Amino acid sequence: MPQIADLIAYNPEGQIVLIAEIKSKIDTSRAWATRMRRNMLAHDFAPASRFLLLALPDRLYLWKDAGNTPELIEPTYEFDALPFFQPYYDRATISPDQLNGPSFELIVTSWLNELIRSGIPTTVPDAQRQSLQESGILEALHGASIAIAAPA
C-alpha cells in the first residue's frame, strides 16, 4: 500500500504544487535528505509535484522540478529552519529536540499556511528570504490550500 506525503498544497485550479514530508529528526545532512527523497519515491510516496519539501525541525530541504523518479537528486535548496520555525517553538515553549511528529506537523502546517496568507515573515534573515523567494515556491503557493494527507 503506498504511503502518501504528510501535506499536499493545491493551487486554485486544483493542481498539486507542493508535496511536503515532515520528520521530527534533527541533525541531518544533504546526503541524508537525498537518500530520503529517493527512498520515498521508490515506495510510491506521492504524485508528481513541481516542489517537494522535506521539513525537519532544524533544516528544510526543497526540490524544484526534480521529477518523481527515485533517483539520487540533491535538494535544489537547503535552509536553516530555525528562523522560519522559531516563533512557533517560542509560542509552544518547546525546543526542536523536544518535538514529536504530530506537534511538528502542526507547526509546518501553520508555517505553510502563513506563507500562503502573508508571505515570508520579516524576522527571517534577508539571505534566506531571498533564496526562498527566488525558488518560486511563494508564487506557486499563491492562493493555494493545504491538505493533510491520509495514508492511501
Image (cartoon, rainbow, N blue to C red):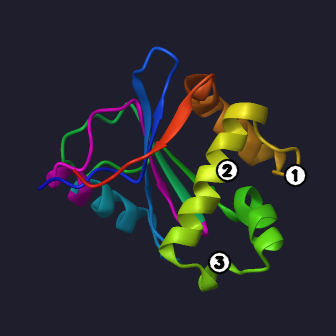
Residue 112 occupies which quadrant of the picture? top right
Which SS class for mark 1?
Answer: loop
- Residue 143 location in percent, x, y? 62, 22
- Residue 108 location in percent, x, y? 59, 56
Q: State which region is magenta.
A: 39-58
Residue nearest the viewer, comparing 115 with 30: 115
In this rendering, does residue 98 appear at all? yes
Assess disc 2: are there few (<14), some (14-19) or many (≥20) residues with their C-alpha within 10 Å of its C-alpha: some
Which SS class for mark 3?
Answer: helix
The disc at residue 3 is none
First-in-chain label (2 vs 1):
2
The disc at residue 123 is 1
> What residue does disc 2 label?
111
First-in-chain label (3 vs 2):
3
Residue 138 occupies which quadrant of the picture? top right
Is residue 40 rendered magenta in the image?
yes
| Residue found 26% across the figure and 36% down from its top | 47
- Residue 147 location in percent, x, y? 47, 41
Q: In 3D space, how far apart are the residues under numbered discs 1 and 3 (Cα atoms)?
A: 18 Å
In this rendering, does residue 27 appear at all? no
Q: Relative to 151, is 95 on the left or the right?
A: right
Assess disc 3: are there few (<14), some (14-19) or many (≥20) residues with their C-alpha within 10 Å of its C-alpha: some
